[in-house]
Image (cartoon, rainbow, N blue to C red):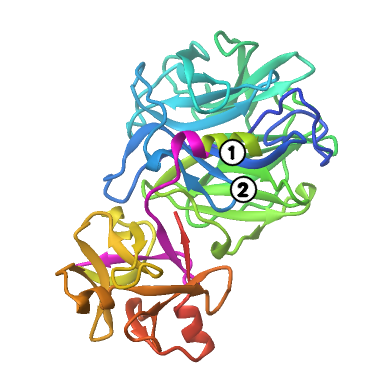
Amino acid sequence: MTNPSRRHFLGMAATVPLATTGALALGAGTAHAADSAYAMVYFTESNTMLEANYNLHLAVSTDGLRWTPLNQNAPVATPTLGAKGLRDPFLLRKQDGTFVVLATDLSGTDWTRNSVYIHVWDSTDLRTFTGYRLLKLHDMTTTHSWAPEAYWDASRGQYGILYSSVNSSGHNVIMVSYTTDFRTTTNPQVFFDPGYDVIDGNLTLGVNGVNYLYYKKDQTLVGARSTTLNPGSFTPFSTGVAHGGTEAPTVVKSLTGNTWFLWGDTYTPNGVFYAWQSSDLASGTWTAVDQKLYTQPLNSKHCGIHPITSTEYTNLIAKWGAPAWNRLKSYNYPARYVRHSGFAGRIDEYPFDPFPDSQWKLVPGLADSSAVSFQSVNYPARYLRHYNYALRLDENDGTSTFAGDATFHRTAGLADSAWSSFRSYNNPTRYIRHANYALRIDPVSTATERQDATFQVGY
């Protein structure tokens, strides 16, 4: 298989009262009444593997769509056992209200490596990670334990751990092993085998009495359902969705409405998250979400998402810090970000390497501290400035001309006031815009030009 191990987010609710949102059992993504934000765990890769980092990363979001990577997008925990690297991390709030993190025991892309273990951490608050260990799932030493996820099976009084392994027929199936403490497991068995290759099982439990299992089949995300959690009880039913080759389904419910989101990750190393939405899981149909509405953490791969409280969100920002840099997304080409290439300013489709070309520090304007200048992260002596109306990355020569050329007034977005536009300091009738993907400053009057001159400042 090609890059077959991609995880998803399934979550477990704590024992505090549950929100009455139709999720009648404790399961993937189930929120309790106090939840008002989300946490995401992931690892990182990029086009040329410049950002290949097989450690635990963490991001937060208030809406589950736009994400803030923590700790400057650097790891928050590092596996030191087994392969000494992880893929496919998963986050679960246990019955006692604390968290557990699970992950595939695999560093890099050696798909031939087999491990009967997964990585495990405990955490009370996602600010510290303790009790790090390997957990054995089965004795099948000729196959793997990919993409672990967990759920609470109330009828058994145990947690089930789902993972992908090869069965006796030679294709991947979704397995389950049971545990009470995430230190020992029992009774490994096939949980879902439709007769063909499937990986990346993601459960959502107890929605109007039905449990939903999403998984990867033929680079497409497909769903099955059952009214029980018995192994072998799930039946495929949904219409498949994909954007290119897609894996790692992650189903998460909005905390403010009756919308469900299905996330998927392209299976190449330069993975991109795509999202679909539905107001009715029972329908099995999904509609693509406009890419303007969501932004993944930089270089993130195969994520796990879980609801958290506003206090947990605030404490995580305080502990790990938001990035000291930003990325700027194009309004009318939301797959593209502002970057420099050959020191020329432009918008290019994410992902690309060197990825720091798209990271900017928005500093007080060199000519006016109430405005902004764009300082390059990977060339910190250089700033984005206009020259003959074209934007390029030049070294600050200390002159007033350079300072004026590199200073811009940030305004409400010309096409969307929730976004931003940037008016030139010394050519105040002109705004930064893209034209044929190149950045320049131009007068703006038409609807298309207003869209060209509108950007989202995020991460």
| Residue numbers of the magenta segment | 317-342
- Quarter the N terminus occupies: top left
Residue 127 appearing in the image: yes
Residue placed at 26% from the left, 49% from the top?
48
Q: 337 above or below 412? A: above
Which residue is under mark 2?
62
124 up-or-down from 70: above or below: above
Q: Are marks 1 and 2 in contact (CB under 8 Å)?
A: yes
Q: Which mark is residue 69?
A: none
Give residue 74's position: percent from left, percent from top. Answer: 36, 38
- Residue 36 or residue 103, whichever sits in front: 36
> Depth check: 188 or 12 in front?
12
N-terminal-most mark, 1 or 2: 2
* 41 displayed left or right of 152: left
Q: Residue at x 14, y 69 (%)?
A: 397
**Element type at marker 2?**
loop
Residue type at mark 1: give it: Tyr
- Magenta stretch: residue 327 in it? yes
Residue 410 place in picture, x, y as percent: 45, 72
Q: Could you tell me residue 133's position as x and y percent?
A: 45, 13
Q: Gap between marks 1 and 2, in whole Å?
A: 8 Å
The residue carrying mark 1 is 313
Q: Is residue 217 above or below residue 10?
A: below
